[in-house]
Amino acid sequence: MIATNPGRAAVRNRDMTAAWRHIDVALCGLVATTSILGALMIYSATRNKEASIPFIDKHIIFMVIGVAAMVAAASIDYIKLRDWARLLYVLGVLSLVGVLIPGVGSEHKGIRAWYDIGPFQIQPAEVTKVLVIIAVASYLGTSIEKLGPKQLITALVMFGVPMGLIMLQPDLGTNLVFVMIAAGMFAVAGIPMRFLVALAIVGIVGVVAILQSDTLEGYQRDRLTSFASPDAASSGAVYNTKQSQTAISLGGLTGQGYLEGEYTAGGSVPEQQTDFIFTVPGEELGFIGSSVLLALLGGIVWRVWRTAQLARDQVGRLISVGVLCLLVFHIFENVGMNLGIMPVTGIPLPFVSYGGSATISAFACMGLVLNVHMRRFS
């Protein structure tokens, strides 16, 4: 028979109950409202598309799993997650290795980045973003030494290994997200500015080198550069952006009405439920509706930023900042590419775009932020 300690269990239950009393209700409300609005946009974009399982049905399943992931991520004290950080990191890296193996990972448009599980696809890079944030925050936040070259190099390796594997897929867009997460976490961790500047220069040179090499597929290079030189890009590279801009312009101030969008109903915007989801509120809800959506996303960003300020320790602060940088870049890049002012990278709009891995990971990120917020007084 296994011996138990009722007193210790009672203390754990009491601590858990006390933590949940400090949950960020505002953040939960913002996430719930944005997710419901996102589901409505996905339904509008996909209701006329044929699929074995309707897109909206699968997305609702993803949302339910995401909420479960959020609750799980919030329930375990993030300080205790440090004990699991290495294992979680290794699992994330192994998942990226596995997806590169022919017959194991599936390929779509020249990118081998998914696992096929029945009618669903899992993109491990999305989940690995969350795991890397936990691992790097645990390392930098608990370092007893002054942060310098040693800590920077170690953290760079922690980011570099998954980024290298993702580049083999190849997926430059996801790696840009990792770069933004790293920059934010390094800055808050207190790594000297001269190292950050040097890192930025190396990063810029690296991106330019990748664009000039044969690492990316031709259409990927065109998508990344067409926003700056549309005349020099292939017609296919600028078509999506032009269709997106036209759909948004048709919305005007108040929109054409939900489910009444000409371009949305006609399927005129490619990848509308994922990359170009912002065109749906743009066309059907207009400037006012789109502004409401952006205000909701801005509210989420504000609550995450506020949690970073209130965090009880450096680990919690770094976790929150990592999530903050991820959110801000996703929002800025996705909306920007819909408007034609940013390159098309395939980065989804959090809580709005269709996609199982991205949806679940976004909810898990919110769980980590709730975790930090709930235990700010501990």
Image (spheres, helix red, strand yellow):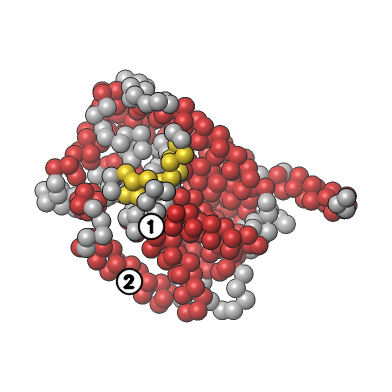
Depicted 161 relative to depicted 217: above or below: below
Q: From the image, tell me which residue sits under label 2.
A: 202
157 horizontally vs 79: left or right: left
Name the element at disc 1: helix
275 horizontally vs 21: left or right: left
Q: Nearer the viewer, residue 287 or 228?
A: 228
Q: Can residue 140 be spotted in the picture?
A: yes
Q: From the image, tell me which residue sits under label 1.
A: 166
261 horizontally vs 140: left or right: left
Depicted 254 relative to depicted 336: above or below: above
82 horizontally vs 341: left or right: right
Question: Which residue is located at x 29 percent, y 67 percent?
Answer: 206
Name the element at disc 2: helix
| Image location of residue 251, percent across then percent down | 28, 28
Question: Which residue is located at x 49 percent, y 63 percent?
Answer: 185
Specify the amino acid type for callout 2: Val
Question: Which residue is located at x 27 percent, y 27 percent?
Answer: 267
The mark closer to the camera, 2 or 1, is 1
Depicted 201 relative to depicted 232: above or below: below
| Image location of residue 115, percent across then percent down | 43, 45
Specify the amino acid type for callout 1: Ile
Q: How many marks can you see?
A: 2
| Image location of residue 299, percent across then percent down | 49, 43
